[in-house]
Image (cartoon, rainbow, N blue to C red):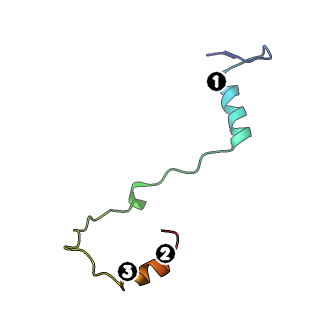
Amino acid sequence: MLEERESGMRFSDEEFAAQRVQRFGRLPAQIRPEDHVVLVESSARPGRPAAAGSDDEWVLRNPCF
């Protein structure tokens, strides 16, 4: 497939690929399947955590709110 640019020059797909590699470099190597990490879902902790300090302390630590 040939493409035409604004300058009127026609480039083939291979020429465009070579220009792209020259401009941006090569892609990094693909990640091998054995390097993937298996995710283990954990259950949510029941209940809310206990509040730390009083409301006055919270206001002192968070003056923007």
Residue annotated with mark 1: 13
Residue farthest left in this picture = 46
Which quarter of the image is occupied by the N terminus?
A: top right
Counting labels gives 3
Which numbered disc flags the more N-terminal residue, 1 or 3? 1
Residue annotated with mark 2: 62
Percent across and percent down for residue 51 are 31, 81
Which numbered disc flags the more N-terminal residue, 1 or 2? 1
Q: Residue at x 68, y 35 (%)?
A: 20
What amino acid does circle 1 point to? Answer: Asp
The disc placed on residue 55 is 3
Label 2: how many Cα within 10 Å (few below 14, some 14–19, many 20+): few
Q: Residue at x 36, y 84 (%)?
A: 54
Residue farthest right in this picture = 7
Please state which of residues 44 and 47 is positioned toward the viewer in this rendering: 47
What amino acid does circle 2 point to? Answer: Asn
Query: Circles 1 and 3: CB distance less than 8 Å?
Result: no
Q: Residue at x 19, y 73 (%)?
A: 46
Residue 3 is drawn in which quadrant? top right
